[in-house]
Image (tube, helix red, strand yellow):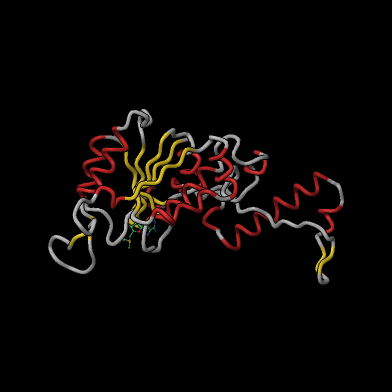
C-alpha cells in the first residue's frame, strides 16, 4: 500500500519508522511518503494560513498550497490508479475497525493533515468533484492537527495488511473484530504475582472451558463498558418500535 501524508509538521511521522509499521516499510509492504505543505507555499514566509472569510477567531488553511501539493501527488506518474484522499476532521464520519478493514483494501491513500481551523472548504469541494475524498474523525474531541489522527488510522489500517502482523490469528480475537465485542482479559506467567492468581481455568488445558470463559468475560466486559456494542436482543428490532407500528 502506498501512503502519502501532507502536513506542516513532517517530523510527526518519524513514528511510522518504528515497530511493526517500520518493519513493514523496510520489507516493502508499505510505501510511506511525507510532504511538507510549506514546500507549496511560495511567499517569503511560506505562509499556509489566512484569516477566515466573514471574520471570526482562528486561521484557515489557504487553498493554493493544498491545491498545488495534491495536484502534484495525484498527477505523478507513480500515483495509484484511483487514490483516496482522507482529511482527518472532527466533523467527519467516525473511524472504526470496520472502516480500517475497508481501507486496508485501498492501494493508495493520501492523508491531508489540517491545522488551525482546517483547510478552506473549496479544497474538499474540488477534490470530491475530481476523485474520492473522505473526511474522517477519530473520535468526538478536538485535536490541534490531523497528524496524530492520521498516525492512529495508519496504524489501524497498516496492521491489517497481509504480512504486517506476524501471526494473522492474533488479529481475529481482538476487540471490535469478528464478534464486535471487547476482548477478554489476558494473562501470562508467573501463575501468581503479588498474591494475584491467573484464573485457574486458563491453566486447566481444557480448551472448550477456556473458550467458554473468554466468551463470558468478553460479554461481561462489553455489557459493563460498552453496552452499545452488544448485539440486539430478540425483540429489540426496529419493527418493534412504536413509530413503525
Ligand atoms: N475547526 C475545526 C472543527 O471544529 O471542526 C477543528 C480544527 S482542529 C483545531 C485542526 C485539525 O485537527 C483539523 O483540521 C483536523 O485535521 C484535526 N483534528 C482535530 N480533531 C480531530 C479528530 N477528532 N479527528 C480527526 N482529526 C481531527
Q: Is residue 30 left or right of residue 46?
A: right
Judge by depth and name the residue closer to the eye, 127 or 98: 127
Give the image location of residue 1, x and y in percent: 47, 35
Judge by depth and name the residue closer to the eye, 185 or 43: 43
Q: Say if residue 236 shows up in the picture.
A: yes
Give the image location of residue 20, x and y in percent: 59, 46
Q: Is residue 9 left or right of residue 52?
A: right
Specify the quadrant of the image occupied by residue 72: top left
Give the image location of residue 39, x and y in percent: 28, 49
In this picture, is 97 found above or below 104?
below
Give the image location of residue 172, x and y in percent: 63, 42
In this picture, is 55 found above or below 168?
below
Q: Say if residue 233 shows up in the picture.
A: no
Who's the residue at 23% across and 51% down the image?
Answer: 41
Who's the residue at 25% across and 40% down the image?
Answer: 127
Judge by depth and name the residue closer to the eye, 63 or 14: 14
In this picture, is 67 found above or below 119?
above
Judge by depth and name the residue closer to the eye, 215 or 93: 93
Q: Is residue 67 left or right of residue 225?
A: left
Ligand 1 picture quarter: bottom left
In this picture, is 178 found above or below 47?
above
Q: Is residue 174 left or right of residue 105?
A: right
Residue furthest toward the front?
44
Q: What count of labels does the image hold?
A: 0
Residue furthest toward the bottom?
194
Who's the residue at 44% across and 50% down the image?
Answer: 95
Specify the quadrant of the image occupied by residue 43: bottom left
Residue furthest toward the right?
204
Amino acid at each position: 500500500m502506498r501512503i502519502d501524508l501532507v502536513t506542516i509538521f513532517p517530523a510527526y511521522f518519524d513514528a511510522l519508522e518504528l515497530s511493526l509499521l517500520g518493519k513493514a516499510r523496510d520489507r516493502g509492504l508499505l510505501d510511506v511518503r511525507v510532504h511538507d505543505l510549506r514546500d507549496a507555499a511560495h511567499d517569503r514566509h511560506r505562509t499556509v494560513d489566512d484569516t477566515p472569510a466573514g471574520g471570526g477567531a482562528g486561521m484557515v488553511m489557504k487553498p493554493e498550497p493544498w491545491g498545488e501539493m495534491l495536484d502534484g501527488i495525484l498527477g505523478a506518474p507513480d500515483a495509484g490508479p484511483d487514490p483516496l484522499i482522507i482529511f482527518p476532521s472532527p466533523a467527519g464520519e467516525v473511524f472504526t475497525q470496520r472502516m480500517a478493514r475497508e481501507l486496508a483494501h485501498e492501494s493508495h491513500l493520501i492523508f491531508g493533515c489540517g491545522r488551525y481551523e482546517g483547510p478552506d472548504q473549496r479544497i474538499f469541494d474540488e477534490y470530491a468533484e475530481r476523485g474520492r475524498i473522505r473526511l474522517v474523525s477519530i473520535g468526538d474531541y478536538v485535536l490541534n492537527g490531523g497528524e496524530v489522527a492520521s498516525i492512529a488510522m495508519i496504524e489501524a489500517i497498516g496492521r491489517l495488511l497481509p504480512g504486517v502482523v506476524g501471526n494473522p490469528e492474533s488479529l481475529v480475537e481482538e476487540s471490535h473484530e469478528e464478534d464486535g465485542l471487547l476482548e477478554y482479559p489476558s494473562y501470562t506467567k508467573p501463575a501468581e504475582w503479588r498474591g494475584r492468581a491467573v484464573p485457574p481455568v486458563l491453566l486447566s488445558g481444557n480448551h472448550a472451558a477456556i473458550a467458554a470463559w473468554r466468551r463470558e468475560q468478553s460479554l461481561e466486559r462489553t455489557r459493563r463498558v460498552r453496552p452499545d456494542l452488544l448485539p440486539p436482543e430478540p425483540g429489540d428490532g426496529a419493527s418493534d418500535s412504536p413509530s413503525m407500528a
